[in-house]
Amino acid sequence: MSQLLVRRSHRVQPHRPYQVFSLPDDQEYDYDPANPDPIAHINFSQDIDLLLIVPATANIIAKFANGVADDFLSSTYLASTAPVMIAPAMNTTMWEQPATQRNIQRLKADGVHFVEPVAGELACKTVGTGKLEDVENIVSQALKVLSEKTKKVIKENIEAGRNGDFALKNDLSGERLLITVGGTREAIDPVRFISNHSSGKMGFAVAEAARDRGAEVTVVCGVTAVEPPNGVAVINAVSAREMFDAVMKELANATVFVGAAAVADYAPTNAADAKIKKENQDKLILELKKTPDILSEVSKRRKKGQLVIGFAAETNEVVTYAKIKMGKKDLDMVIANDITKEGAGFNTDTNIATILTRVGSEIELPLMSKRALADRILDEILKIRAA
Ligand code: C5P
């Protein structure tokens, strides 16, 4: 039987920016009397970035080639507009059959990508062509198709001038942004943690705007209330330490670092291995230690030409504290905002900020969407580059 693997851009593990849905062999979904959703293949097929069939049998290839839709997988194929990649595996004679080869040619003409099988020992214990290609190779070819798709979508958007009110240009092409986003969680024990109210909206707005302007974007993502935008690489990091490690690993590849995460300043010195019991304890004293300052360390390690940008969320004397921060952390730019103001700060779609730069400019901005602010920040990056 064939297996269906679908990848789409959501949060996942480091260096695996796609989520994989796997269809087990024995599951039918559609046409299964036990399944209450009569159009599961439609609902499922609209939300995928790549339909990857590994391994694909001669039978499913024949169905795809002829538009047969009599099970979940073949119906999904017909209902989906996502790119399709097929990695066949079968007995050599079945592979070489003119019927199979004819079906493959037809699918190639329809734009389907193939990862051809290789020679080797087959499941039927014979030796010949029909063995599934190495999984690593299949994954790397799948990622290539996904990145081509992302580029194509962005190009179409740019050409059509789409994406709300925002001008889509290519003025950040060649820049590689590394952005920390969201809050971190510092474990007290396996159940409890210390965290903050960060939603991730500001960092994701910068990521989205940079993507639309042609930059390559990687987000190191803590805990967020919203999903990352499509078309950016996502690395998950829950604690400040994990975020620090992920950033340092990626830093060499970045041309601009933006610290938009609300990194916890303190973490429990020793997280308990087992749940701390409350019985017989009226007080619980936690010892906290300072977390590593990611932004300061990035600034220290920066290479020539790398820009380092931070945020300063304050409750009073906002600009004064932000300027001190810019000096102390040696930043090229800091975006200061007063989180006590209506429409600014955590979990809102808007912000009120002042952009301060190393060379002394001070741009006080009115209330605007986080996405609009993101574009203003990127405009200032371009001004620094031009200077
Ligand atoms: O020092 P403070 O937390 O006010 O500075 C805020 C800026 O520093 C933000 O850009 C935030 O992402 C960054 N930061 C960091 N690592 C920390 C603390 C803050 O990168 N441990």
Image: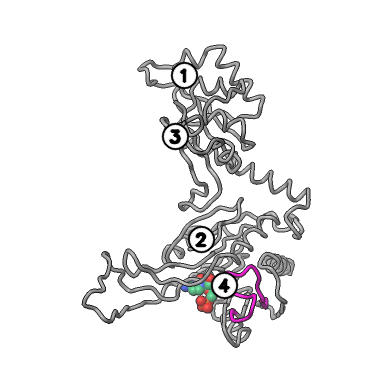
Instruction: Tell me the mark number nearer the camera, choosing from 2 and 4.
Output: 4
Say which residue appears at 51% left-offset and 32% top-offset. Answer: 30
Tell me if residue 10 comes above or below residue 310 in the rendering. Answer: above
Decide whether the magenta segment is chiefly helix, strand or loop.
loop
User: Which residue is tagged 1?
Assistant: 129
Q: Mark 1 touching mark 4, by CB under 8 A?
A: no
User: Which residue is tagged 3?
Assistant: 34
Which stretch did the figure color magenta?
A: 339-355
Tell me if residue 158 comes above or below residue 184 in the rendering. Answer: above
Q: Nearer the viewer, residue 30 or 136?
A: 30
User: Which residue is tagged 4?
Assistant: 346
- In terms of secondary structure, where does tag 1 sit? strand
Instruction: Tell me the mark number nearer the camera, choosing from 3 and 1.
Output: 3
- C-alpha separation, residue under disc 2 versus residue under disc 1: 43 Å
- C-alpha separation, residue under disc 1 versus residue under disc 4: 58 Å
Say which residue appears at 44% left-offset and 71% top-offset. Answer: 195
Where residue 221 is drawn, which disc sits there?
Answer: 2
- C-alpha separation, residue under disc 3 versus residue under disc 4: 44 Å
Tell me if residue 351 comes above or below residue 318 in the rendering. Answer: above
